[in-house]
Structures are given as structure tokens and as C-alpha cells.
Image (cartoon, rainbow, N blue to C red):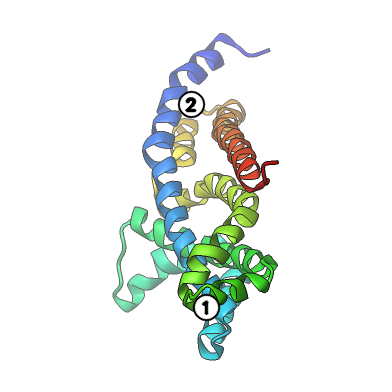
Amino acid sequence: MISARVWEILVDSFWKILLPGLTMTIPLTAISFTLAFLIGTVTALVQFANIRILKQIARFYIWIIRGTPLLVQLFVVFYGLPVVGIVLEPFPAAVIVFSINEGAYSAEILRAALESVPAGQLEAGECVGMSYLQTIFHIVLPQAMRTAFPSLSNSLIAMVKDTSLASNITVTEMFMATQRIVARTYEPLALYIEVGLIYLMFSTVLTKLQRVGEKKLSAYSTPKE
């Protein structure tokens, strides 16, 4: 049974946790994922074009980022770079790390999606007089994006939850707000369950939007009889 005191703490803390979620967690996710998508698209296109030097650089970037923990990357940027004179505020540091980290994963998703497009699509573009870049951006990339959409959506949902790691570099997002309330009230179980439910709420909304997007893309790509 939950005591009256715990209920009071939960009700009082709900908005104190949700507000940082709306003003910090969501913006951090939105900005980071947008930049990650751009990084991932460029990296995937470089690999798809098979430009040897650039492809090797892209593969090295993906190897390093995917092979090291996100938390370590956060610590290197926020706590390590000041040693060499590069000092970043917590929020920009988190954006940089999340963008670079997610960009590596998005690059692999998009690379696989680009490679799934039939090679004949490139030839078809050339046959109608389109340049390589025109064929990529008008024919190949739109088809690849439809294929990659579910995986990219899953990555976005995962990033919402991963933003809790930003509390380790003093970003005042939902998890840090919860930690501060726990330190004051000494009710860790109830409060950590509460913040978990708020993360679940955000993820559920994004999952619903993902399904709507998939249905629209499916309807768009299915030929009408």
C-alpha cells in the first residue's frame, strides 16, 4: 500500500519531473536526432558512392563510435576536453555527443537501406538524363528513406530514454530532476517508478506516431489498381 505521504510526494513531483522533460529532454532529443540524421545521411551516401578515402574515414568513424559506450563519450567531451582547453556547457556537450553517437547508427541504417534499392534505379535515372546526384536525391534516397523509417523511428525512441545519461554531465533533464527530489524526500522506489512511467509515456506517443507514419508510407508506396 502507498502511504498518503508518498502519494503527496508523487503528485507534487509529477510536474517538477515532467517540466524538465518538456523543456530539456524533448528539445535535447529533437536537436540531437536532427543533427544525427544529417550526419548519418552524409556518412551513408559517402559509403554508397564508394569513394575510397571518404569511405574509409566513414567506416573508421562508425567503428569508433559504435565500439565505445555513450557514457564514456559524454565524459570524454564534457570532462576530458577541458584538459586541452575546450570547455563546453552541459547542453551543447550533450547535443554534440548524442548527435555524433546516433549519427553512426543512423549511417548504418541508411547505408543498408540505400543498398536495398535495386541497382536498376540508378540506371533508370541515367537513361532519362539525370545526373548521379539528381538520381540519388530524387529516386534512390526517397526509396531508401521509406525502408529506413521504422529503424530510424526506433532509434529516436531509444534516444529519448538515453537522454537520461545526460544527467551525468549535469544536464537538468527528467532523471536529474528526479534524483534531486529523491535526495530531498528519501523515496527512491516511488519516484524512480514515476519517472520511468513518464519516459514510457513519451515513448508510447512516439510509437503511435511511428505506426501512423508507417501506414502512410505503406499507402504511398503501394500501387493503386
Mark 2 residue crowding within 10 angstroms, few (<14) / some (14–19) / many (20+): few
The x, y position of residue 157, in whole percent, is 58, 45
The x, y position of residue 160, in whole percent, is 53, 45
Q: Given the current orientation, which residue lies at the most extreme top position?
A: 4
Query: Looking at the picture, does residue 207 appear above or below residue 103?
Result: above
Which residue is at 49% across, 40% downward?
A: 175
Mark 2 vs mark 1, foreground winner is 1
Which residue is at 54% across, 87% downward?
A: 51
Residue denoted by label 2: 185
Q: Amino acid at mark 2?
A: Thr
Quadrant location of residue 27?
top left
Q: Considering the image in quadrants, where does the C terminus appear? A: top right
Query: Looking at the picture, does residue 157 appear above or below residue 60?
Result: above
Q: Considering the image in quadrants, where does the N terminus appear? A: top right
**SS assignment at label 1:** helix
Instruction: Compare residues 177 and 182 and report the one nearer the observer.
Output: 177
The x, y position of residue 118, in whole percent, is 69, 69
Instruction: Compare residues 219 and 202 and report the one nearer the observer.
Output: 219
Which residue is at 55% across, 17% downward?
A: 6
Would residue 209 appear left or right of 21 to someone viewing this image?
A: right
N-term-proximal mark, 2 vs 1: 1
Would residue 51 appear left or right of 28 to someone viewing this image?
A: right
Q: Amino acid at mark 1?
A: Val
Mark 1 residue crowding within 10 angstroms, few (<14) / some (14–19) / many (20+): many
Residue denoted by label 1: 46
Would residue 86 appear left or right of 54 to someone viewing this image?
A: left
Q: Given the current orientation, which residue lies at the most extreme bottom position?
A: 53
**Residue 192 appears in view:** yes
Question: How many angstroms separate mark 2 from mark 1 (CA)?
Answer: 52 Å
**SS assignment at label 2:** helix
